[in-house]
Image: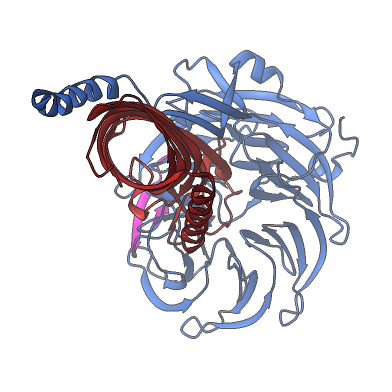
Amino acid sequence: MKKNLFALPFMLVLIGLQLSGCVKDIVTREYTFYRPVYKTKTEVRSQIKSQAARTLQQPGKIYYKDGYLFVSELDKGVHIIDVRNAATPQIIGFVAIPGCVDLAVRGNTLYADMYTDLVAVDISNPAAITLQKVVEGVFPHRLYDQYQPDQSLIITDWVRVDTVVRGGDQYKSWGIATAQFDALSNSGNRSGTTNGTGGSMARFALAGSHLYTVSHADLKTFNVATATDPRYVATTTIGNGWGIETIFPYKNNLFIGSQNGMYIVSLAQPDKPALSGTFDHARVCDPVVANDNYAYVTLRDGTVCQGFINQLDVVDISNLSSPKLLSSYSMTNPHGLGNDGTMLLVCDGRDGLKILDVSNPRAVKQISRLSMPDAYDVIPLGGLALVLAGNGLHLVDYTNATAPVVMGRINISPKL
Amino acid sequence: MKYLLTILLLSAAGISTFAQTNRWTPTPNIQVGFMGGSFGPALEGRLGFGVKKQGLVLGLASGIDTYRFTSVPLVATATYSHGTRKWKPFASAAAGWNIAAVQPHEKGGQYQYPSGNTRFTNDFIWMPGSWVPASYRSGWLAEIGGGMGRHTKKGHAYTMGLHYSAKTISESMTELVWTGSTQIEHPATAHYLMQRISLRFGFTW
């Protein structure tokens, strides 16, 4: 039995080691993911057409033209909103453009990105819009490499999938608008084609007869002299070629906001935009607007931007080649902004819309604040501001800057 | 934990009373074990209290189980030893609760950020994220095993045996899920069924 005394533990250890290799932990995971839905480019293009007005769900960029506001519905298309009566804004139609993030409007032509392509859509009759042209492959940064190995296909939707996976031990790697578009149809200038006005968070900007777009790394130029026939001209690398976020046109210049500075790009030769000045700052997100002498830059922290600064910088741009910081004004989490004379309207995130007196650029003062959640972007229209916030589109009368009033509102219906 | 101790003490008292009135013998025991499974090695320790009549011991046991997610099993046990010699083979089984006592270093989790303008395209409001550990829900434990026991003249016994045991724990957290344009929070749950082989040494009074 003494032999057993020593042999038994060894035997049990050996058997135990053998058996422990046979048992496995089983993990059953319940989680949600979104699966891309693919269509061919032909199918997608055939679907760019007028659709019934729908509610705002994931609004993105805003663009104003002749009494109408165009709001991109993230990856779905563009809402057309009649804001001629500030008290009763109405969504009058929807243009389905899969993959749409940014937009611009010139004359009766809507430009938008459709994933990697630029599309030009005739919107003179919102009840029967027509696709005019597709410039293919000009936005390669919109390619979902991991989901889209076949570039002849386009992701048109993402479907929520609630799933249960039982397996081994590895964690998962884890109707038609009937309103007539008179104002647009009748719009015009000496050349018969005018450009709209974008918000400061835009990545598309129209200047003269050119459309400029920014990706995270570069500036692209399109000639849109014939509005329905945009032609790709060139790609220009700006700064160090990364972190570009927004573009704002003013007179003969583009003001480009990037994560590490503001770039001033001269449009003296519209086909060949050239960097004329740079204003560096700490790494943060920074949309920018400008007038003749000053540029206003909001700096904020953000996922992409990192950084820990939230402020408004006033920059002297009287010498475009050498912009100089004049003053800084502390803010909460500023996003889009718009300039109207001596007033600056700033969307300060959860603090809402702030109206600032910038008559003395060295001593910026807050005039008033209008509460709204997650204020994002604003287009001031001389007494009426179109403000996109977390709970909807607000039409704000600020003729009395000390007491701005929300005249009308269109709510966001969150995506379920 | 204090509730657990209270339950154990009350149970021990109840068993002891039962034993005295029914001619069963009270038998406390202690066990330590070395476990192996697909997650790696781990230790366990257990205190039990039972009543014995002939070769059958019925009782309750509790202790600590450090495999993957630390837990405190509270189980009903049954052991049967056969034979009359000094060395007796035994078979045992146990089943009961597996109370989650997951330690911080064992926890999964997710960085979470204050909700903001995530609805707006590729432009997330961001503020310093905070690590939100997962929460854990207790499950069950069951085991079966056998071995040999060396019995002394005083009636004590030294035991060693191999046991297969399975325990469950559920892990819940909120995940940020890519929707094609942004990330939104969704609940995610993982149910773990952990299977182990344990080499266990014990002493029975």
Q: Nearer the viewer, residue B114 or B83?
A: B83
Q: Which residues are magenta?
A: A263-280
Give residue A35's position: percent from left, percent from top: 57, 26
Total of numbered circles in the picture?
Answer: 0
A3 left or right of B91 in image: left
- The residue sitting at 55% across, 53% down in the picture is A201
- The residue sitting at 57% across, 50% down in the picture is B118
Give residue A50's position: percent from left, percent from top: 79, 29
A409 left or right of B95 in image: right
Note whether A314 is above or below A62 in the view shown.
below
Quadrant for the C terminus of chain A, please: top right
Magenta stretch, main secondary structure class? strand
- The residue sitting at 66% across, 50% down in the picture is A62
Q: Nearer the viewer, residue A197 or A349?
A: A349
Asked whether the viewer can see residue A268, the reply is: no
Give residue A225's position: percent from left, percent from top: 59, 35
Chain B hue? red
Asked if residue A270 lies in the magenta stretch, the reply is: yes
Note whether A68 is above or below A404 in the view shown.
above
Identify the image quadrant of residue A88.
bottom right
B48 left or right of A343 in image: left
Q: Nearer the viewer, residue A98 or B14?
A: B14
Instruction: Describe the colour scheme in one phrase.
Output: by chain
Quadrant for the N terminus of chain A, please: top left
- The residue sitting at 89% across, 39% down in the picture is A180
Asked whether the viewer can see residue B29, the reply is: yes
Note whether A33 is above or below A182 in the view shown.
above
Note whether A32 is above or below B5 in the view shown.
above
Give residue A114's position: percent from left, percent from top: 58, 30
Q: Which chain is drawn using blue?
A: A
Q: Nearer the viewer, residue A80 or B85?
A: B85
Asked if residue A196 lies in the magenta stretch, the reply is: no
